[in-house]
Image (spheres, coloured by chain):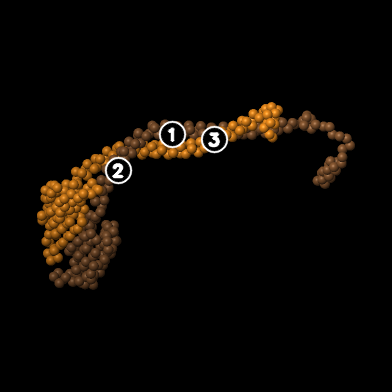
Chain colours: A orange, B brown
Amino acid sequence: MTSQELGPFMKRNPATACCGLLSLLLVCGIYFRNGLIPEAEAELAQKSAEGERYAANIRNSDKLKQQYAEILAANKEVDARAVRVNQVGTNIQFFYKLESETGVRLADPSQVTRVAAKGKTVFMPVAFNVSAQGDLPQLLNFLRMLENRTRYSRVINASLTQSVVNRSAPLSLTLNLELLGSP
Amino acid sequence: MLSLLKKKSDAADFRQTAPWHANFRNVEKLPDIKVVRTAFFVNAAAISVALALLIYFASQEWHLHTLRGHISEWQSQIDRDRKASADAVAMFKKFQAEEAKINEVEAFIKSKPLVSELVTRLAETLPPNIALDTMDLRETGLTLRFSVRGAPDAASGHATAYLEMLKADAVFSKGFDEFTFTSTPTRNPNTGRMAVEFFLRLKGAKK
Protein backbone atom coordinates (compact mmCIF):
# COMPACT_ATOMS: atom_id res chain seq x y z
CA MET A 1 0.00 0.00 0.00
CA THR A 2 1.45 3.34 -1.06
CA SER A 3 1.06 6.63 0.80
CA GLN A 4 -1.48 7.80 -1.81
CA GLU A 5 -3.64 4.77 -1.13
CA LEU A 6 -3.31 5.20 2.68
CA GLY A 7 -5.56 8.29 2.82
CA PRO A 8 -8.56 6.71 1.10
CA PHE A 9 -8.05 3.50 3.05
CA MET A 10 -8.19 5.42 6.36
CA LYS A 11 -11.31 7.26 5.23
CA ARG A 12 -12.95 4.00 4.27
CA ASN A 13 -11.84 2.21 7.55
CA PRO A 14 -11.74 4.83 10.33
CA ALA A 15 -11.89 2.25 13.18
CA THR A 16 -8.97 0.27 11.80
CA ALA A 17 -7.01 3.47 11.29
CA CYS A 18 -7.66 4.67 14.84
CA CYS A 19 -6.75 1.27 16.26
CA GLY A 20 -3.57 1.19 14.19
CA LEU A 21 -2.59 4.63 15.39
CA LEU A 22 -3.38 3.73 18.99
CA SER A 23 -1.39 0.49 18.69
CA LEU A 24 1.55 2.43 17.34
CA LEU A 25 1.42 4.85 20.26
CA LEU A 26 1.09 2.01 22.73
CA VAL A 27 4.05 0.14 21.24
CA CYS A 28 6.12 3.31 21.56
CA GLY A 29 4.94 3.75 25.14
CA ILE A 30 5.71 0.13 26.01
CA TYR A 31 9.12 0.37 24.38
CA PHE A 32 10.17 3.60 26.08
CA ARG A 33 8.77 2.79 29.54
CA ASN A 34 9.90 -0.82 29.55
CA GLY A 35 13.24 -0.02 31.23
CA LEU A 36 11.56 1.73 34.16
CA ILE A 37 10.31 -1.50 35.77
CA PRO A 38 13.71 -3.17 36.29
CA GLU A 39 15.03 0.15 37.59
CA ALA A 40 12.16 0.47 40.03
CA GLU A 41 12.57 -3.16 41.10
CA ALA A 42 16.26 -2.64 41.77
CA GLU A 43 15.51 0.54 43.72
CA LEU A 44 12.84 -1.28 45.71
CA ALA A 45 15.25 -4.12 46.54
CA GLN A 46 17.87 -1.63 47.70
CA LYS A 47 15.40 0.40 49.75
CA SER A 48 13.84 -2.65 51.34
CA ALA A 49 17.28 -4.03 52.26
CA GLU A 50 18.24 -0.70 53.78
CA GLY A 51 14.93 -0.40 55.61
CA GLU A 52 15.19 -3.94 56.97
CA ARG A 53 18.74 -3.28 58.10
CA TYR A 54 17.64 -0.19 60.01
CA ALA A 55 14.70 -2.06 61.49
CA ALA A 56 17.01 -4.92 62.56
CA ASN A 57 19.43 -2.44 64.12
CA ILE A 58 16.63 -0.92 66.15
CA ARG A 59 15.19 -4.33 67.08
CA ASN A 60 18.57 -5.68 68.14
CA SER A 61 19.35 -2.62 70.21
CA ASP A 62 16.27 -3.22 72.28
CA LYS A 63 18.21 -4.04 75.47
CA LEU A 64 21.49 -2.50 74.40
CA LYS A 65 21.20 0.50 76.72
CA GLN A 66 20.76 -1.74 79.70
CA GLN A 67 23.56 -4.07 78.61
CA TYR A 68 25.84 -1.12 77.98
CA ALA A 69 25.17 0.20 81.48
CA GLU A 70 25.92 -3.27 82.89
CA ILE A 71 29.16 -3.65 80.97
CA LEU A 72 30.24 -0.15 82.02
CA ALA A 73 29.66 -1.08 85.64
CA ALA A 74 31.60 -4.33 85.14
CA ASN A 75 34.49 -2.45 83.57
CA LYS A 76 34.55 -0.01 86.46
CA GLU A 77 35.02 -2.98 88.73
CA VAL A 78 37.76 -4.34 86.45
CA ASP A 79 39.52 -0.99 86.53
CA ALA A 80 39.34 -0.97 90.30
CA ARG A 81 40.87 -4.45 90.44
CA ALA A 82 43.69 -3.74 88.00
CA VAL A 83 47.01 -2.67 89.48
CA ARG A 84 48.90 0.43 88.35
CA VAL A 85 52.43 -0.22 87.14
CA ASN A 86 53.95 2.80 88.82
CA GLN A 87 52.28 2.19 92.20
CA VAL A 88 54.89 -0.33 93.31
CA GLY A 89 54.31 0.20 97.02
CA THR A 90 50.56 -0.38 96.77
CA ASN A 91 51.11 -3.42 94.59
CA ILE A 92 53.53 -5.06 97.01
CA GLN A 93 51.20 -4.19 99.87
CA PHE A 94 48.63 -6.52 98.26
CA PHE A 95 50.95 -9.51 98.87
CA TYR A 96 51.67 -8.49 102.45
CA LYS A 97 47.94 -8.26 103.10
CA LEU A 98 47.61 -11.82 101.85
CA GLU A 99 50.48 -12.81 104.10
CA SER A 100 48.78 -11.37 107.16
CA GLU A 101 45.43 -12.96 106.23
CA THR A 102 46.76 -16.44 105.50
CA GLY A 103 49.70 -16.80 107.89
CA VAL A 104 52.30 -17.67 105.25
CA ARG A 105 55.77 -16.10 105.46
CA LEU A 106 56.75 -14.08 102.41
CA ALA A 107 60.35 -13.48 101.42
CA ASP A 108 60.65 -10.07 99.79
CA PRO A 109 58.05 -10.05 97.02
CA SER A 110 59.25 -7.91 94.14
CA GLN A 111 57.70 -6.25 91.13
CA VAL A 112 59.53 -7.09 87.91
CA THR A 113 57.63 -4.86 85.48
CA ARG A 114 58.44 -1.23 86.18
CA VAL A 115 57.61 0.51 82.93
CA ALA A 116 54.25 0.61 81.23
CA ALA A 117 54.37 -1.18 77.89
CA LYS A 118 52.87 0.57 74.90
CA GLY A 119 50.41 -1.58 73.05
CA LYS A 120 47.00 -1.79 71.49
CA THR A 121 45.46 -3.42 74.52
CA VAL A 122 43.91 -1.54 77.40
CA PHE A 123 45.51 -3.67 80.07
CA MET A 124 49.00 -5.04 80.54
CA PRO A 125 50.45 -7.81 82.66
CA VAL A 126 52.56 -6.66 85.61
CA ALA A 127 55.05 -9.35 86.65
CA PHE A 128 56.01 -10.21 90.23
CA ASN A 129 58.28 -12.70 91.97
CA VAL A 130 56.89 -14.07 95.20
CA SER A 131 58.29 -16.68 97.58
CA ALA A 132 56.30 -17.97 100.51
CA GLN A 133 56.68 -20.55 103.24
CA GLY A 134 54.00 -22.27 105.28
CA ASP A 135 52.09 -25.49 105.75
CA LEU A 136 49.89 -26.85 102.97
CA PRO A 137 46.58 -25.30 104.18
CA GLN A 138 48.23 -21.89 104.57
CA LEU A 139 49.83 -22.02 101.13
CA LEU A 140 46.63 -23.28 99.57
CA ASN A 141 44.69 -20.47 101.18
CA PHE A 142 47.31 -18.00 99.95
CA LEU A 143 47.07 -19.34 96.40
CA ARG A 144 43.27 -19.30 96.40
CA MET A 145 43.17 -15.71 97.63
CA LEU A 146 45.80 -14.72 95.12
CA GLU A 147 43.95 -16.32 92.22
CA ASN A 148 40.38 -15.51 93.13
CA ARG A 149 40.28 -12.26 95.05
CA THR A 150 40.78 -8.52 94.68
CA ARG A 151 43.26 -8.66 91.78
CA TYR A 152 43.24 -10.54 88.50
CA SER A 153 46.26 -12.79 88.43
CA ARG A 154 47.82 -15.65 86.51
CA VAL A 155 50.73 -17.78 87.63
CA ILE A 156 53.41 -18.17 84.95
CA ASN A 157 55.77 -20.46 86.89
CA ALA A 158 55.15 -22.11 90.23
CA SER A 159 57.31 -24.33 92.34
CA LEU A 160 56.08 -26.05 95.48
CA THR A 161 58.74 -27.93 97.41
CA GLN A 162 58.55 -30.18 100.44
CA SER A 163 61.64 -31.25 102.34
CA VAL A 164 62.26 -34.89 101.51
CA VAL A 165 64.02 -35.60 104.79
CA ASN A 166 61.84 -33.62 107.20
CA ARG A 167 58.20 -33.96 106.21
CA SER A 168 57.00 -31.72 109.03
CA ALA A 169 59.09 -28.78 107.80
CA PRO A 170 57.16 -25.94 106.12
CA LEU A 171 56.63 -26.08 102.36
CA SER A 172 58.24 -23.55 100.05
CA LEU A 173 56.31 -21.90 97.27
CA THR A 174 57.99 -19.81 94.59
CA LEU A 175 55.83 -17.98 92.09
CA ASN A 176 56.44 -15.93 88.97
CA LEU A 177 53.09 -14.37 88.47
CA GLU A 178 51.39 -11.55 86.65
CA LEU A 179 48.68 -9.24 87.87
CA LEU A 180 46.40 -7.54 85.39
CA GLY A 181 47.47 -3.93 85.31
CA SER A 182 46.91 -0.70 83.52
CA PRO A 183 49.58 1.86 82.64
CA MET B 1 -10.24 -36.02 -1.45
CA LEU B 2 -10.41 -37.48 -4.96
CA SER B 3 -13.48 -35.45 -5.84
CA LEU B 4 -11.85 -32.22 -4.72
CA LEU B 5 -8.84 -32.85 -6.94
CA LYS B 6 -11.08 -33.51 -9.81
CA LYS B 7 -12.92 -30.24 -9.32
CA LYS B 8 -9.65 -28.30 -9.26
CA SER B 9 -8.60 -29.73 -12.61
CA ASP B 10 -12.07 -28.83 -13.98
CA ALA B 11 -11.62 -25.24 -12.84
CA ALA B 12 -8.24 -25.06 -14.49
CA ASP B 13 -9.73 -26.36 -17.74
CA PHE B 14 -12.46 -23.76 -17.53
CA ARG B 15 -9.92 -20.91 -17.18
CA GLN B 16 -7.96 -22.16 -20.10
CA THR B 17 -10.98 -22.21 -22.42
CA ALA B 18 -11.79 -18.84 -23.98
CA PRO B 19 -14.96 -17.08 -22.69
CA TRP B 20 -17.82 -17.06 -25.13
CA HIS B 21 -18.30 -13.33 -24.62
CA ALA B 22 -16.31 -10.29 -23.41
CA ASN B 23 -16.08 -9.71 -19.58
CA PHE B 24 -17.14 -6.15 -18.81
CA ARG B 25 -17.17 -6.51 -14.97
CA ASN B 26 -15.19 -3.91 -12.96
CA VAL B 27 -14.19 -6.05 -10.02
CA GLU B 28 -12.85 -3.05 -8.02
CA LYS B 29 -16.24 -1.35 -7.97
CA LEU B 30 -18.40 -4.38 -7.38
CA PRO B 31 -19.98 -4.36 -3.88
CA ASP B 32 -18.79 -6.79 -1.22
CA ILE B 33 -21.61 -9.25 -1.14
CA LYS B 34 -20.05 -11.73 1.34
CA VAL B 35 -22.21 -12.64 4.34
CA VAL B 36 -19.60 -11.18 6.74
CA ARG B 37 -17.67 -8.33 5.18
CA THR B 38 -13.88 -8.30 5.10
CA ALA B 39 -13.89 -4.91 6.82
CA PHE B 40 -15.42 -6.55 9.89
CA PHE B 41 -12.50 -8.95 10.22
CA VAL B 42 -9.98 -6.18 9.61
CA ASN B 43 -11.62 -3.96 12.23
CA ALA B 44 -11.91 -6.83 14.69
CA ALA B 45 -8.24 -7.69 14.27
CA ALA B 46 -7.16 -4.05 14.64
CA ILE B 47 -9.33 -3.57 17.73
CA SER B 48 -8.03 -6.84 19.26
CA VAL B 49 -4.41 -5.87 18.73
CA ALA B 50 -5.01 -2.37 20.11
CA LEU B 51 -6.91 -3.77 23.07
CA ALA B 52 -4.20 -6.34 23.83
CA LEU B 53 -1.53 -3.65 23.67
CA LEU B 54 -3.64 -1.37 25.84
CA ILE B 55 -4.09 -4.08 28.48
CA TYR B 56 -0.38 -4.89 28.45
CA PHE B 57 0.56 -1.21 28.71
CA ALA B 58 -1.93 -0.64 31.52
CA SER B 59 -0.71 -3.65 33.48
CA GLN B 60 2.87 -2.45 33.07
CA GLU B 61 1.94 1.01 34.30
CA TRP B 62 0.02 -0.46 37.22
CA HIS B 63 3.00 -2.60 38.17
CA LEU B 64 5.25 0.46 37.98
CA HIS B 65 2.80 2.45 40.08
CA THR B 66 2.71 -0.33 42.71
CA LEU B 67 6.51 -0.52 42.79
CA ARG B 68 6.77 3.23 43.26
CA GLY B 69 4.24 3.02 46.07
CA HIS B 70 6.33 0.37 47.82
CA ILE B 71 9.48 2.41 47.27
CA SER B 72 7.91 5.49 48.84
CA GLU B 73 6.68 3.35 51.79
CA TRP B 74 10.19 2.00 52.38
CA GLN B 75 11.64 5.47 51.97
CA SER B 76 9.36 6.87 54.64
CA GLN B 77 10.27 3.96 56.94
CA ILE B 78 13.97 4.57 56.25
CA ASP B 79 13.59 8.28 57.01
CA ARG B 80 11.80 7.42 60.24
CA ASP B 81 14.33 4.78 61.39
CA ARG B 82 17.57 6.33 60.18
CA LYS B 83 18.35 8.31 63.33
CA ALA B 84 17.36 5.58 65.74
CA SER B 85 19.45 3.08 63.78
CA ALA B 86 22.48 5.38 63.71
CA ASP B 87 22.15 5.84 67.47
CA ALA B 88 21.92 2.08 67.95
CA VAL B 89 25.00 1.47 65.82
CA ALA B 90 26.97 4.13 67.69
CA MET B 91 25.98 2.61 71.01
CA PHE B 92 26.88 -0.86 69.78
CA LYS B 93 30.35 0.38 68.84
CA LYS B 94 30.76 1.76 72.35
CA PHE B 95 29.51 -1.55 73.71
CA GLN B 96 32.05 -3.44 71.58
CA ALA B 97 34.87 -1.27 72.90
CA GLU B 98 33.83 -2.03 76.47
CA GLU B 99 33.32 -5.70 75.64
CA ALA B 100 36.89 -5.90 74.32
CA LYS B 101 38.14 -4.95 77.79
CA ILE B 102 36.11 -7.73 79.39
CA ASN B 103 37.36 -10.22 76.78
CA GLU B 104 40.91 -9.15 77.49
CA VAL B 105 40.45 -9.80 81.20
CA GLU B 106 38.84 -13.17 80.50
CA ALA B 107 41.68 -14.18 78.19
CA PHE B 108 44.22 -13.10 80.81
CA ILE B 109 42.61 -15.17 83.55
CA LYS B 110 42.01 -18.27 81.44
CA SER B 111 45.44 -18.33 79.81
CA LYS B 112 47.04 -20.30 82.66
CA PRO B 113 45.79 -23.10 84.90
CA LEU B 114 44.82 -22.28 88.48
CA VAL B 115 47.68 -23.46 90.69
CA SER B 116 45.43 -23.60 93.75
CA GLU B 117 43.12 -25.99 91.88
CA LEU B 118 46.04 -28.23 90.84
CA VAL B 119 47.50 -28.36 94.36
CA THR B 120 44.08 -29.08 95.86
CA ARG B 121 43.46 -31.88 93.38
CA LEU B 122 46.92 -33.35 94.00
CA ALA B 123 46.27 -33.32 97.73
CA GLU B 124 42.90 -35.00 97.21
CA THR B 125 44.18 -37.75 94.92
CA LEU B 126 47.55 -38.57 96.50
CA PRO B 127 47.57 -42.25 97.54
CA PRO B 128 48.78 -43.18 101.07
CA ASN B 129 52.08 -44.65 99.83
CA ILE B 130 53.08 -41.62 97.79
CA ALA B 131 54.31 -38.24 99.08
CA LEU B 132 54.75 -35.11 97.00
CA ASP B 133 58.28 -33.67 97.06
CA THR B 134 58.11 -31.03 94.36
CA MET B 135 55.55 -29.54 92.04
CA ASP B 136 56.98 -27.40 89.30
CA LEU B 137 54.70 -25.60 86.87
CA ARG B 138 56.35 -24.10 83.79
CA GLU B 139 55.30 -22.77 80.39
CA THR B 140 55.37 -26.25 78.88
CA GLY B 141 53.87 -28.29 81.68
CA LEU B 142 53.90 -29.59 85.20
CA THR B 143 56.72 -31.64 86.70
CA LEU B 144 55.84 -33.67 89.78
CA ARG B 145 58.39 -35.42 91.98
CA PHE B 146 57.26 -37.99 94.50
CA SER B 147 58.69 -40.31 97.11
CA VAL B 148 57.03 -43.71 97.00
CA ARG B 149 57.06 -45.98 100.03
CA GLY B 150 57.53 -49.75 99.68
CA ALA B 151 59.60 -52.36 97.88
CA PRO B 152 60.93 -51.21 94.47
CA ASP B 153 58.56 -53.40 92.41
CA ALA B 154 55.51 -52.43 94.45
CA ALA B 155 56.57 -48.76 94.49
CA SER B 156 56.86 -48.68 90.70
CA GLY B 157 53.39 -50.23 90.49
CA HIS B 158 51.97 -47.59 92.83
CA ALA B 159 53.61 -44.83 90.77
CA THR B 160 52.26 -46.22 87.49
CA ALA B 161 48.78 -46.59 88.95
CA TYR B 162 48.91 -43.01 90.22
CA LEU B 163 50.01 -41.72 86.82
CA GLU B 164 47.07 -43.54 85.23
CA MET B 165 44.78 -42.05 87.84
CA LEU B 166 46.02 -38.54 87.04
CA LYS B 167 45.52 -39.24 83.33
CA ALA B 168 41.90 -40.14 83.96
CA ASP B 169 41.27 -37.33 86.42
CA ALA B 170 38.82 -34.65 85.26
CA VAL B 171 40.88 -31.70 86.53
CA PHE B 172 44.21 -32.84 85.11
CA SER B 173 42.90 -34.18 81.81
CA LYS B 174 41.20 -30.82 81.24
CA GLY B 175 44.48 -28.90 81.27
CA PHE B 176 47.13 -31.47 80.28
CA ASP B 177 47.40 -33.85 77.34
CA GLU B 178 50.53 -35.94 77.94
CA PHE B 179 51.26 -37.84 81.14
CA THR B 180 54.72 -39.45 81.23
CA PHE B 181 57.50 -40.65 83.52
CA THR B 182 60.47 -38.36 82.92
CA SER B 183 63.01 -40.98 84.11
CA THR B 184 63.23 -44.47 85.54
CA PRO B 185 62.19 -44.58 89.20
CA THR B 186 65.32 -44.77 91.41
CA ARG B 187 65.87 -45.31 95.11
CA ASN B 188 66.77 -42.22 97.17
CA PRO B 189 69.71 -43.27 99.40
CA ASN B 190 68.82 -40.65 102.06
CA THR B 191 65.25 -41.78 102.61
CA GLY B 192 65.31 -45.30 101.22
CA ARG B 193 62.19 -44.47 99.18
CA MET B 194 61.71 -44.61 95.45
CA ALA B 195 62.00 -41.23 93.76
CA VAL B 196 59.58 -40.85 90.85
CA GLU B 197 59.11 -37.97 88.45
CA PHE B 198 56.12 -37.29 86.18
CA PHE B 199 55.75 -34.73 83.47
CA LEU B 200 52.30 -33.48 82.49
CA ARG B 201 52.38 -31.47 79.28
CA LEU B 202 50.08 -28.44 79.14
CA LYS B 203 47.54 -28.53 76.35
CA GLY B 204 48.67 -26.32 73.49
CA ALA B 205 52.22 -26.00 74.85
CA LYS B 206 55.16 -26.22 72.44
CA LYS B 207 56.87 -29.61 72.29
Q: Which residue is mark 1?
A: B74
Q: Residue furthest right?
A: B20
Q: Is residue A102 visible?
A: no
> Depth check: A144 or B86 in front?
B86
**Mark on residue A27?**
none
Q: As shown in the figure, which amino acid type bears the numbered disc 3?
A: Phe
Count every numbered label the image shows and give the total: 3
Residue at the spot of label 3: A32
Figure check: A156 above or below B6: below
The residue where tag 2 is placed is B96
Q: Residue drawn at (22%, 70%), measured in percent from left and top? A: B185
Q: Are marks 2 and 3 in contact (CB under 8 Å)?
A: no
Mark 3 Cα shell of 10 Å, populated few (<14), some (14-19), many (≥20): few
**Residue lying at 69% horizontally and 31% vertically, measured from the top left:** A4
Residue type, mark 1 in image: Trp
Q: Residue B202: x percent and y percent?
A: 26, 60
x then y, percent, for residue B83: 35, 33
| Chain of residue at mark 1 | B
At label 2, which amino acid type do we have? Gln
Q: Residues within 10 Å of mark 2 (few under 14, many from 20)?
A: some
Q: Is residue A69 visible?
A: yes
